[in-house]
Amino acid sequence: MLAVNFDDTIAAISTAIGEGSVGIVRLSGKKALAIADAVFSGKGNLKPSEFKTYTMHYGRIVCAGEVLDEVILTIMRAPHSYTREDVVEINCHGGIVALRKVLDLVLGRGCRLAAPGEFTRRAFLNGRIDLAQAEAVIDIIRAKTDSALKVSLEQLKGGLSKEINKIRQGLLNILVVLEANIDFPEEDLKQHDMLEASESLSVVRRQLDRLLDSAKAGRILRDGIQVVICGRPNVGKSSLLNALLKKERSIVTPVAGTTRDSIEEMIDIKGIPVRIVDTAGILKPRNLIERKAVWRARNHIHSADMVIVLFDANRKLKEEDWKLIKEVKNRNVIAVINKIDLKAKIEKEKLSKTFYKIVELSAKKVKNINLLEDALYEFVYQGKLASPDFTLVNNLRHVNALKEAQKLLNNAASTLSDKLPLELLTQDLKDAAGYLDKILGKDLPGDLLDRIFADFCIGK
Ligand SMILES: Nc1nc2c(ncn2[C@@H]2O[C@H](COP(=O)(O)OP(=O)(O)OP(=O)(O)O)[C@@H](O)[C@H]2O)c(=O)[nH]1
Ligand SMILES: [Mg+2]
């Protein structure tokens, strides 16, 4: 981002571009009300700058006598607004032409186009939210499942920030105890102060470990996992994709080799966003198309987080099955036996020796699909459920900062037990607190903030 002036009044279209029933042009800054006065023509005698805060007004946006759109104007005065500045939202008709005309008009009246995420960045800079909360805004917009949304909403509410602050405060309390002793040689560190510092450090480390433990679940909820369905031709891979999706997405026929191109879809499995891929059956290719299809399927198998290997209950295991079993040996695998509505001919006992977990279902009859969903969920959380209050760490920047803090606290614990100089200990604790501050956005350099907010859309 070029150096921007955060004193400017900014404007942007805040709703998604495209046809919609309503579209919003949002303004924020000192001139927002004056600009609204210049472009809005309402019913009564009052001008927008005279409207009460948190009120809505019907009227028209007028430019040189021409009506650009019929609108509803919302006024939110500083400091009780999203940005803590004066905010005006012009609810226009949703078409892009009207919205652009209104935006161009206000831009011509003394404000500039907002940079990506600048409204939220101002909310952060003006102290309404910390950086972790600001980052939650983008995750709310991008949430792919209900659970992912809950985690981000909790973060926006300040749940994560509260946890981080608690750990940070714990560290500062230990520092107070230690610094009272620092001017004396370490043997003078009073026995009970030593004990207190050591116990408090254990508590803080446990809190930090717990937060980091939640990171895997948090990251999965935010970013999802990729699961690929593979198997030899005709075992029912496309039927399984359709059963999981609950719609006829992939073509299913009795002809072996129906699927050529990999098909990818997003599904919500118990709150986990799963990108599921149906692939071409793995076979000995007979022509160029099949060779490419198999090559593509193999690529997916090797890049996915999880592989579902599908078998046909009604057929004995074939050479292709064994080749595939060998190929996925070191991957995260769930073995699935499909077509359990037909006579069982598969040598299940041989599969049981190879796979720890086998799910049996019928994709065609949509039977036992829930067992596969359970197995996937179980695999992701390995028995550990997401904490019920949804205070999870889901952002890589936060995870990395917490890991650095964890390393420093581990060091600090060794320093304390080895009775090394107190200065070493206090420095590690201060540095650890510094990493926690970074999560909340304290003293972050502008270019790092630029990078964080560049991920936002314009208008948010
Ligand atoms: N009886 C029965 N038939 C099934 C079941 N699942 C799939 N089929 C049938 O098996 C045949 C192949 O199904 P597909 O889903 O196209 O199999 P596929 O593995 O995607 O096949 P390719 O794309 O050719 O590799 C179709 O005739 C399906 O109706 C099942 O659970 N029971
Ligand atoms: Mg198929």
Image (spheres, grey):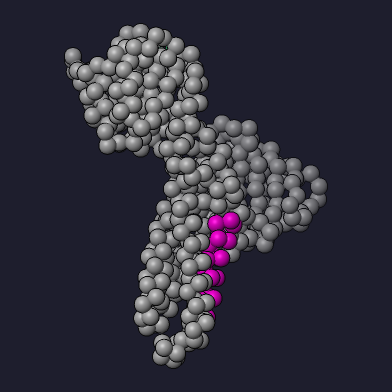
Q: Quadrant of residue 287?
A: top left
Span shown in magenta? 158-176
Q: Nearer the viewer, residue 120 or 42?
A: 120
Question: In the picture provided, is 207 more to the left or to the right than 324?
Answer: right
Q: Where the N terminus falls, by quadrant?
A: bottom left
Query: Residue 141 location in percent, x, y?
Result: 53, 43
Q: Is residue 424 left or right of residue 154?
A: left
| Residue 211 rendering spot, x and y as whole percentages | 49, 56
Which residue is drawn at the image coordinates 43% and 28% (left, top)? 265
Where is residue 215? Give x, y as percent.
45, 51
Most common secondary structure along the magenta stretch: helix
Q: Is residue 2 visible?
A: no
When the figure is inspected, residue 312 is found, relative to residue 130, above or below; the finding is: above
Horizontal side, residue 173 vs residue 327: left or right: right
Report the residue at 61% width, 61% height from top: 128
Q: Residue at x 37, y 72 (%)?
A: 414
- State whether residue 261 is above or below residue 442: above
- Asked if residue 174 is among those painted magenta in the image, a careful observer would answer yes
